[in-house]
């Protein structure tokens, strides 16, 4: 596990460092308290992968799809408003997870038994000086 502490202005570099660690992994579970910067970090990862969409939390749509510079999809899930793993199943999350494409999931505790075995956990911790620590 790697740990990087950073300020907001260092976000592009940290996102690139994270991208460099991805390897063959495709499913990433982002943990952190409300307001820790999960959506901000995911948006920067997508930007660094070449997506040029308007980024925001897919809280109401649950999943947003972006395209990287090669046209490959990147799926961004925000499961905050999900009440049960059944809702995740009904939205077809397993199809996304089995697609072989990058899936970035906020609030993964809502997945329950649908959490993929091969998913990597990414933690974002808010520090006293307002910097963030990313563990991946």
Image (tube, rainbow, N blue to C red):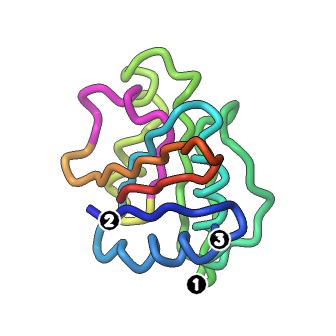
Q: Which residue is drawn at 64% across and 61% down?
A: 7
Q: Label 1 vs label 3: CA separation? A: 25 Å
Question: On the rendered structure, is 135 left or right of 39?
Answer: left
Q: Mark 2 points at which residue?
A: 2
Bounds of the magenta segment: 103-115
Q: What SS does tag 1 mark?
A: loop
Q: Name the residue under label 3.
A: 10
Q: Mark 1 points at which residue?
A: 70
Farthest residue toward the right?
A: 54
Instruction: Say which label, 3 or 2, has the lower sequence index.
Output: 2
> Residue 61, percent across and down?
67, 36
Between 57 and 74, which is closer to the camera in this rendering?
57
Q: Which residue is drawn at 56% across and 38% down?
A: 78
> Residue 48, percent across and down?
62, 76
Q: What SS does tag 3 mark?
A: helix
Farthest residue toward the front?
A: 129
Q: Label 1 vs label 2: CA separation? A: 28 Å
Q: Label 3 vs label 2: CA separation? A: 16 Å
Quadrant position of the N terminus in the picture: bottom left
Quadrant position of the C terminus in the picture: bottom left
Question: Disc 1 vs disc 2: Cβ atoms closer than 8 Å?
Answer: no
How many residues crowd mark 3 within 10 Å: few (<14), some (14–19), many (20+)? few
How many residues crowd mark 1 within 10 Å: few (<14), some (14–19), many (20+)? few
Q: Which residue is drawn at 53% across and 55% down?
A: 75
Q: Residue at x 38, y 56 (%)?
A: 135
Number of numbered discs visible in the structure rendering: 3
Magenta region includes residue 108: yes
Between 11 and 108, which is closer to the camera in this rendering?
11
């Amino acid at each position: 596990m790697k740990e990087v502490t950073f300020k907001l202005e260092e976000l592009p570099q940290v996102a690139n460092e994270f991208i460099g660690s991805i390897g063959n992994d495709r499913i990433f579970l982002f943990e952190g308290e409300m307001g820790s910067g999960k959506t901000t970090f995911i948006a920067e990862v997508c930007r660094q992968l070449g997506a040029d969409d308007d980024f925001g939390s897919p809280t109401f749509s649950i999943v947003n799809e972006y395209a990287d510079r090669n046209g490959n999809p990147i799926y961004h899930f925000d499961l905050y408003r999900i009440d049960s793993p059944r809702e995740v199943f009904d939205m077809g999350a397993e199809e996304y997870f089995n697609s072989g494409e990058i899936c970035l999931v906020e609030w993964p505790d809502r997945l329950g038994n649908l959490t993929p075995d091969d998913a990597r956990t990414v933690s974002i911790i808010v520090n006293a000086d307002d910097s963030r620590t990313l563990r991946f």
